[in-house]
Image (tube, grey):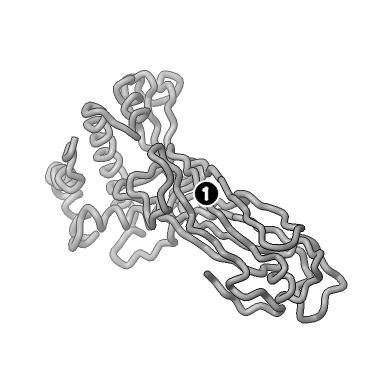
């Protein structure tokens, strides 16, 4: 639980009891883990949490009158998309101990990177008659905590769309295309887009079954992953700003590519790999194929 030094009185920690976030899956509820390595942008997150508040104690210890309205709110932030927003809130105007049940669903297309869930007890309305030592502004935080969930797995993560390539400039018979836009400082979410050709039913079906893939689906997904990794690494190596000394913001395209490079080529320098790619493209292609372990486990 985060305790900040604020210019007004706040209640003691035991005035609020927050249960851990629960991740709702097809097999039931589990305590939200630190990371979801198999997550992708097609996977929405269903989360639940129970929070109990001793309203009388929270108001008294904050120097608020017994009728002061409070709000318990949840806000989410995702570094991969640079998006955030309110998830759910409950207005608390009663007395005694109340229990709030939060049940939220976050769209996978809005997420990515590190997901932060902030739960806060705040003053619901401005109190112009409050004492100098008491909170008076609407939104004044009386209690808060944060739990985090990392959504970047071992594979590069990016949003995707299934479209008809015959309506685009891409070859009609191509199965997929990884689109990369913007600079390395830009957010990964807005820079990468995997386009899947709906006319290629084998590939489109593999992504539909990604949650429970068949053997053929695993082979297709492995091939797409290998090709996407190659495209990303080649894009990074072609950019002179991509080097051993690069320091990109978390959740940026550059940071995603640095993470991918380090995973595929541990203990090897960007300079050496860039030189190999330029001098012997075929050897580089084989090295990359081995690094991504194509078809392993398919």
Relative to 122, is 2 on the left or the right?
Answer: left
Residue at the (54%, 71%) spot, across then down? 2
**Image: 122 above or below 61:** above
**Image: 174 above or below 44:** above
**Image: 60 above or below 161:** below
Q: How many marks?
A: 1
Residue at the (17%, 44%) spot, across then down? 293
**Label 1: few (<14), some or many (≥20) within 10 Å?**
some
Residue closest to the eye, 119 or 180: 119
Query: Which residue is disc 1 drawn over?
Result: 48
Location of residue 208 by image quarter: top left
Q: Residue furthest front?
A: 96
Could you tell me if residue 264 is visible in this image? yes
Relative to 145, is 275 on the left or the right?
Answer: left
Residue closest to the eye, 219 or 174: 219
Under tag 1, what secondary structure?
strand
Residue at the (81%, 64%) spot, across then down? 67
Residue closest to the eye, 93 or 202: 93
Q: Position of residue 276 (x, y in %)?
A: 16, 52
Residue closest to the eye, 73 or 198: 73
Residue at the (31%, 56%) spot, across then down? 259
Q: Position of residue 287 (x, y in %)?
A: 14, 47
């Amino acid at each position: 639980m985060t305790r900040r030094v604020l210019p007004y009185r706040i209640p003691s920690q035991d005035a609020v009891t927050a249960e851990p976030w629960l991740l709702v899956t097809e097999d039931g509820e589990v305590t939200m883990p630190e990371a979801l390595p198999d997550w992708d942008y097609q996977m929405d997150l269903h989360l639940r949490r129970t929070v109990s508040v001793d309203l009388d104690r929270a108001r008294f210890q904050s120097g608020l009158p017994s009728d002061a309205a409070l709000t318990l709110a949840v806000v989410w932030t995702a570094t991969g998309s640079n998006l955030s927003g309110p998830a759910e809130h409950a207005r608390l105007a009663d007395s005694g101990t109340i229990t709030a049940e939060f049940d939220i669903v976050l769209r996978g297309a809005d997420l990515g990177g590190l997901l932060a869930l902030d739960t806060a007890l705040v003053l619901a309305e401005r109190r112009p008659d409050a004492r100098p030592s008491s909170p008076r502004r609407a939104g004044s935080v009386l209690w808060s905590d944060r739990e985090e969930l990392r959504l970047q797995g071992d594979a590069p993560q990016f949003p995707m769309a299934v479209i008809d390539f015959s309506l685009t400039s891409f070859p009609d018979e191509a199965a997929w295309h990884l689109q990369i836009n913007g600079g390395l400082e830009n957010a990964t979410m807005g820079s990468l887009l995997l386009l899947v050709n709906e006319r290629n039913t084998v590939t489109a079906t593999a992504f539909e079954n990604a949650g429970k893939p068949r053997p053929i689906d695993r082979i297709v997904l492995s091939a797409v992953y290998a090709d996407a990794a190659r495209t990303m690494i080649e894009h990074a190596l072609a950019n002179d700003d991509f080097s051993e000394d690069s320091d990109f913001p978390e959740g940026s395209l550059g940071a995603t590519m640095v993470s991918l490079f380090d995973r595929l080529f541990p203990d090897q320098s960007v300079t050496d790999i860039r030189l190999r790619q330029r001098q012997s493209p075929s050897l580089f292609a084989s090295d990359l194929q081995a690094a991504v372990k194509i078809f392993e486990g398919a």
